[in-house]
Amino acid sequence: MSEIYLTKDGFEKLQAELTELKRQKNELSAEINEAREQGDLKENAGYIYGKEKQSQVMTRISELEVRLRSAKLVDNLAINKDEVRLGATVTMRDESTRATLVYTLSSADEADPSAGKISVSSPLAQGLLGSAAGATVIVRLPGGEKQLAILKVEYK
């Protein structure tokens, strides 16, 4: 298994999801027991649905437990804070449109482009990694190349 790096926020988000899934698992167990008491299980849609949903929830719980056990918190790692790395908030300027862009590089679990969080494995993030404020980089994106001037690198 590859190493999993998370920010503190990402770790807490996964823990909250795990807690919610465990709550759902308990509710599903109760629903399945109620459906079982209704008789014929082969034709009991509530029972069948409950068992399928419970299986999905249990699979996700297992995935989250493994991820959380093996996760390394990037906030605790000794990294060069002058360079773009996982957890960095990067302010940059698109040199062709002069638009200012601000993105935080996050793990795939934390990525939320609408909130300005992009996965560190995305093409944009890959093109920024290792760069520092003041640098101009050319990033190859699916829509073509972009020339970006890195204005600021912050770790919050």
Image (cartoon, rainbow, N blue to C red):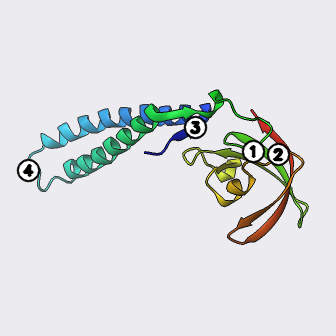
Q: Which residue does the numbered mark 4 point to in the structure image?
A: 40
Callout 1 amino acid: Val
- Percent coordinates x, y for residue 120 in the rendering: 64, 50
| The residue positioned farthest toward the bottom in the image shown | 144
The alpha-carbon separation of the residues under discs 4 and 3 comes to: 46 Å
Q: Which mark is residue 36?
A: none
Quarter of the figure with residue 99: bottom right
In the rendered view, does 81 fall on the left or right side of 74?
Answer: right
- Percent coordinates x, y for residue 110 in the rendering: 59, 44
Question: In what element is the residue under mark 3?
Answer: strand
The alpha-carbon separation of the residues under discs 2 and 1 comes to: 6 Å
Q: Which residue does the numbered mark 2 point to in the structure image?
A: 132
Identify the residue shown where x is 60% and y is 31%: 8
The alpha-carbon separation of the residues under discs 1 and 3 comes to: 15 Å
Screen quadrant of the C terminus: top right
Callout 3 amino acid: Leu
In the rendered view, does 47 fall on the left or right side of 128?
Answer: left
* Label 2 vs 4, first from the N-terminus: 4
The alpha-carbon separation of the residues under discs 3 and 2 comes to: 21 Å
Q: Is residue 76 above or below residue 84?
A: above
In the rendered view, does 129 fall on the left or right side of 138?
Answer: left
